[in-house]
Amino acid sequence: GPAMTTFTQALGQRGLAFIDDGSAARTGGGVPRASADRIIDDRLSADAIAAELATLEANATRGGKALGSGFSYPVTLDVVARWCATLEAKGLQLAPASAVMVRR
């Protein structure tokens, strides 16, 4: 709508991008955008978060990239920190969200 158009125009004028958790509408007004494939901490348990990260790994392996979104909850930070330590051995690499941006 009009509010989103105003927002994306303001982003574009400042050379910024829009990164969302995957739940926002996919319009973007030409502003670079990245949308998460998964929200990793909808369920705040270590096991649930680990399962979401495993799904992200599978998506990245299959499609070459995957973007997850989460909050800075203590359990999220703990699980993600432990998960990050396993990535190199799996042949995976963390990258900034800008690595998966597209212009819409």
Image: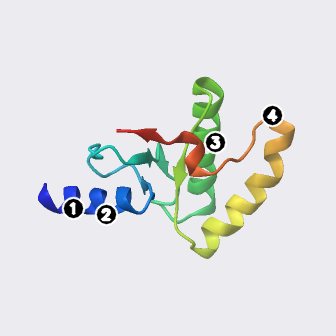
**Towards the viewer: 84 or 98:** 98
First in sequence: mark 1 or mark 3? 1
First in sequence: mark 3 or mark 2? 2
- CA distance separating discs 1 and 3: 37 Å
Q: Which mark is residue 54?
A: 3
Image coordinates for residue 6, horizontal then vertical, percent: 21, 61
Residue identified by numbered label 4: 91
Q: Which mark is residue 10?
A: 2
**Which of the two marks, 2 or 4, is nearer to us in this view?**
2
- The answer to whether residue 78 is above or below residue 53 is below
Image coordinates for residue 80, horizontal then vertical, percent: 68, 59
Mark 1 and mark 3 residues within 8 Å of each other at the beta carbon: no
Residue identified by numbered label 1: 6
In the rendered structure, the answer to whether residue 26 lies left or right of residue 34 reads left
Q: Residues within 10 Å of mark 2 (few under 14, many from 20)?
A: few
Give, as a three-letter code, the residue at label 1.
Thr
What kind of element bears circle 3?
A: helix
Quarter assignment of residue 26: top left
